[in-house]
Image (cartoon, rainbow, N blue to C red):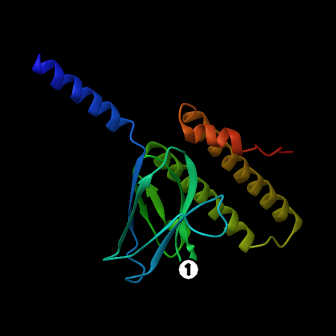
Amino acid sequence: MKFRLLYGLATVSLLSACQSNSYQINGFARAFQEGDTICLMSEDQTVEPLDQTVIRDGKFMFTGETDDFQLFRAYVKQQPDCGTTFFLEPGHITIELYHRSAVSRVSGTICNNEWQRLSDSINLLAKDIVSILRHPATDSLSQQRNVYIIDSLHRRMSDCILHTAQRNSDNPLGRYIQENYKKPEFK
Protein backbone atom coordinates (compact mmCIF):
# COMPACT_ATOMS: atom_id res chain seq x y z
CA MET A 1 0.00 0.00 0.00
CA LYS A 2 2.79 2.44 0.87
CA PHE A 3 4.48 1.60 -2.43
CA ARG A 4 1.36 2.58 -4.38
CA LEU A 5 1.10 5.86 -2.50
CA LEU A 6 4.77 6.66 -3.16
CA TYR A 7 4.37 5.67 -6.81
CA GLY A 8 1.26 7.87 -7.14
CA LEU A 9 2.97 10.86 -5.52
CA ALA A 10 6.03 10.41 -7.72
CA THR A 11 3.84 10.27 -10.83
CA VAL A 12 1.93 13.43 -9.87
CA SER A 13 5.19 15.19 -9.05
CA LEU A 14 6.73 14.14 -12.36
CA LEU A 15 3.69 15.25 -14.36
CA SER A 16 3.57 18.64 -12.67
CA ALA A 17 7.31 19.10 -13.23
CA CYS A 18 6.90 18.35 -16.94
CA GLN A 19 4.11 20.89 -17.19
CA SER A 20 5.98 23.65 -15.40
CA ASN A 21 5.61 27.17 -16.72
CA SER A 22 9.01 28.25 -15.42
CA TYR A 23 11.82 29.46 -17.60
CA GLN A 24 15.46 30.06 -16.89
CA ILE A 25 17.64 32.09 -19.22
CA ASN A 26 21.36 31.59 -18.79
CA GLY A 27 23.20 34.28 -20.66
CA PHE A 28 26.76 34.92 -21.68
CA ALA A 29 27.98 38.43 -22.50
CA ARG A 30 31.75 38.25 -22.15
CA ALA A 31 32.27 40.97 -24.77
CA PHE A 32 30.59 43.54 -22.51
CA GLN A 33 31.56 45.30 -19.29
CA GLU A 34 31.00 44.00 -15.80
CA GLY A 35 27.82 45.62 -14.47
CA ASP A 36 26.28 46.41 -17.88
CA THR A 37 22.51 46.03 -17.82
CA ILE A 38 20.76 43.36 -19.87
CA CYS A 39 17.10 44.02 -20.68
CA LEU A 40 14.41 41.49 -21.47
CA MET A 41 11.57 42.92 -23.55
CA SER A 42 8.64 41.51 -25.45
CA GLU A 43 8.66 42.44 -29.14
CA ASP A 44 5.18 43.91 -28.48
CA GLN A 45 6.47 46.24 -25.76
CA THR A 46 7.75 49.65 -26.68
CA VAL A 47 8.63 51.36 -23.41
CA GLU A 48 9.59 49.38 -20.31
CA PRO A 49 11.41 46.03 -20.32
CA LEU A 50 9.80 43.06 -18.60
CA ASP A 51 12.96 42.51 -16.56
CA GLN A 52 16.57 43.66 -16.19
CA THR A 53 19.70 42.15 -14.76
CA VAL A 54 23.41 42.94 -14.78
CA ILE A 55 26.43 41.15 -16.18
CA ARG A 56 28.57 39.47 -13.53
CA ASP A 57 31.69 37.54 -14.55
CA GLY A 58 30.54 37.70 -18.19
CA LYS A 59 27.19 36.07 -17.39
CA PHE A 60 23.60 37.05 -16.71
CA MET A 61 20.41 35.21 -15.78
CA PHE A 62 16.65 35.66 -15.88
CA THR A 63 14.08 33.39 -14.26
CA GLY A 64 10.33 33.54 -14.17
CA GLU A 65 7.13 31.94 -15.33
CA THR A 66 5.24 32.14 -18.58
CA ASP A 67 2.33 30.21 -19.94
CA ASP A 68 2.73 31.85 -23.32
CA PHE A 69 4.96 31.45 -26.36
CA GLN A 70 6.02 34.95 -27.26
CA LEU A 71 8.76 36.66 -29.23
CA PHE A 72 11.18 38.51 -26.94
CA ARG A 73 14.43 40.39 -27.23
CA ALA A 74 17.41 40.38 -24.86
CA TYR A 75 19.75 43.31 -25.35
CA VAL A 76 22.41 45.43 -23.68
CA LYS A 77 20.72 48.56 -22.30
CA GLN A 78 23.69 50.79 -23.07
CA GLN A 79 23.87 49.40 -26.64
CA PRO A 80 20.33 48.43 -27.74
CA ASP A 81 21.54 47.16 -31.12
CA CYS A 82 23.52 44.45 -29.31
CA GLY A 83 20.95 41.77 -28.68
CA THR A 84 19.05 38.83 -30.01
CA THR A 85 15.46 37.83 -30.62
CA PHE A 86 14.15 34.57 -29.19
CA PHE A 87 11.00 32.88 -27.96
CA LEU A 88 10.28 33.11 -24.27
CA GLU A 89 8.77 29.80 -23.31
CA PRO A 90 8.97 27.34 -20.42
CA GLY A 91 12.32 25.60 -20.21
CA HIS A 92 16.02 26.36 -20.11
CA ILE A 93 17.19 28.89 -22.67
CA THR A 94 20.78 29.93 -23.35
CA ILE A 95 21.64 33.29 -24.88
CA GLU A 96 25.04 34.48 -26.07
CA LEU A 97 25.29 38.23 -26.72
CA TYR A 98 27.96 39.84 -28.87
CA HIS A 99 28.56 43.32 -30.25
CA ARG A 100 27.15 42.28 -33.63
CA SER A 101 23.58 41.03 -33.31
CA ALA A 102 24.09 38.70 -36.29
CA VAL A 103 26.60 36.76 -34.20
CA SER A 104 24.46 36.55 -31.03
CA ARG A 105 22.88 33.15 -30.46
CA VAL A 106 19.99 31.44 -28.70
CA SER A 107 19.52 27.76 -27.89
CA GLY A 108 18.12 25.36 -25.34
CA THR A 109 14.54 24.64 -26.36
CA ILE A 110 13.36 22.95 -29.55
CA CYS A 111 11.72 26.13 -30.82
CA ASN A 112 14.71 28.36 -30.04
CA ASN A 113 17.12 25.85 -31.61
CA GLU A 114 15.01 25.89 -34.77
CA TRP A 115 14.71 29.71 -34.60
CA GLN A 116 18.52 29.99 -34.45
CA ARG A 117 18.87 27.57 -37.35
CA LEU A 118 16.48 29.73 -39.40
CA SER A 119 18.30 32.93 -38.37
CA ASP A 120 21.65 31.45 -39.41
CA SER A 121 20.27 30.54 -42.84
CA ILE A 122 18.71 33.97 -43.38
CA ASN A 123 21.88 35.77 -42.22
CA LEU A 124 24.02 33.71 -44.59
CA LEU A 125 21.80 34.56 -47.57
CA ALA A 126 21.58 38.22 -46.51
CA LYS A 127 25.40 38.47 -46.52
CA ASP A 128 25.36 37.47 -50.19
CA ILE A 129 22.78 40.16 -50.98
CA VAL A 130 24.78 42.81 -49.11
CA SER A 131 27.93 41.78 -50.96
CA ILE A 132 26.19 42.26 -54.32
CA LEU A 133 24.77 45.62 -53.29
CA ARG A 134 28.18 46.86 -52.14
CA HIS A 135 29.60 46.24 -55.61
CA PRO A 136 27.11 47.82 -58.00
CA ALA A 137 27.03 46.70 -61.61
CA THR A 138 28.74 48.90 -64.16
CA ASP A 139 26.71 47.78 -67.17
CA SER A 140 23.15 46.68 -67.90
CA LEU A 141 24.02 43.00 -68.37
CA SER A 142 25.72 42.87 -64.96
CA GLN A 143 22.79 44.77 -63.46
CA GLN A 144 20.32 42.19 -64.81
CA ARG A 145 22.46 39.36 -63.49
CA ASN A 146 22.60 40.98 -60.02
CA VAL A 147 18.82 41.47 -59.99
CA TYR A 148 18.38 37.79 -60.90
CA ILE A 149 20.79 36.64 -58.18
CA ILE A 150 19.18 38.84 -55.51
CA ASP A 151 15.73 37.60 -56.52
CA SER A 152 16.98 34.03 -56.28
CA LEU A 153 18.44 34.66 -52.81
CA HIS A 154 15.17 36.29 -51.70
CA ARG A 155 13.26 33.20 -52.89
CA ARG A 156 15.66 30.97 -50.96
CA MET A 157 15.05 33.05 -47.81
CA SER A 158 11.32 32.61 -48.24
CA ASP A 159 11.77 28.87 -48.78
CA CYS A 160 13.85 28.64 -45.58
CA ILE A 161 11.06 30.31 -43.61
CA LEU A 162 8.37 28.10 -45.14
CA HIS A 163 10.38 24.91 -44.59
CA THR A 164 10.97 25.87 -40.96
CA ALA A 165 7.22 26.38 -40.52
CA GLN A 166 6.54 23.02 -42.15
CA ARG A 167 9.19 21.19 -40.11
CA ASN A 168 7.75 22.70 -36.93
CA SER A 169 4.04 22.49 -37.76
CA ASP A 170 3.45 20.51 -34.56
CA ASN A 171 4.91 23.16 -32.24
CA PRO A 172 4.40 26.86 -31.45
CA LEU A 173 7.23 28.02 -33.74
CA GLY A 174 5.59 26.51 -36.80
CA ARG A 175 2.24 28.03 -35.84
CA TYR A 176 3.89 31.41 -35.18
CA ILE A 177 5.44 31.47 -38.65
CA GLN A 178 2.20 30.35 -40.31
CA GLU A 179 0.29 33.12 -38.56
CA ASN A 180 2.86 35.90 -39.11
CA TYR A 181 4.69 35.23 -42.37
CA LYS A 182 3.20 36.11 -45.71
CA LYS A 183 5.12 34.67 -48.63
CA PRO A 184 5.99 37.43 -51.13
CA GLU A 185 4.48 37.24 -54.57
CA PHE A 186 7.46 36.72 -56.83
CA LYS A 187 7.33 37.72 -60.52
Do we see residue 185 in this rendering? yes
Task: Decide: is 87 above or below 75.
Answer: above
- Residue under circle 1? 79
Position of residue 146 in the picture relative to residue 87 (left or right): right
Q: Secondary structure at mark 1?
A: strand
Which of these two is toward me, 73 or 84? 73
Q: Residue at x 72, y 52 (%)?
A: 154
Which of these two is toward me, 174 or 11? 11
Q: Residue at x 34, y 75 (%)?
A: 58
Q: Quadrant of the N terminus?
A: top left
Quarter of the image for residue 101 reads bottom right
Position of residue 67 in the picture relative to residue 30 (left or right): right
Q: Residue 107 in the image: x percent, y percent?
A: 43, 53
Task: Decide: is 101 above or below 106.
Answer: below
Amino acid beneath label 1 = Gln
Which of these two is toward me, 79 or 186? 79
Position of residue 59 in the picture relative to residue 131 (left or right): left
Task: Decide: is 22 above or below 51.
Answer: above
Q: Residue 40 in the image: x percent, y percent?
A: 52, 65
Q: Residue 114 in the image: x percent, y percent?
A: 50, 46
Q: Within 10 angstroms of label 1, few (less than 14), some, or many (20 or more) residues?
A: few
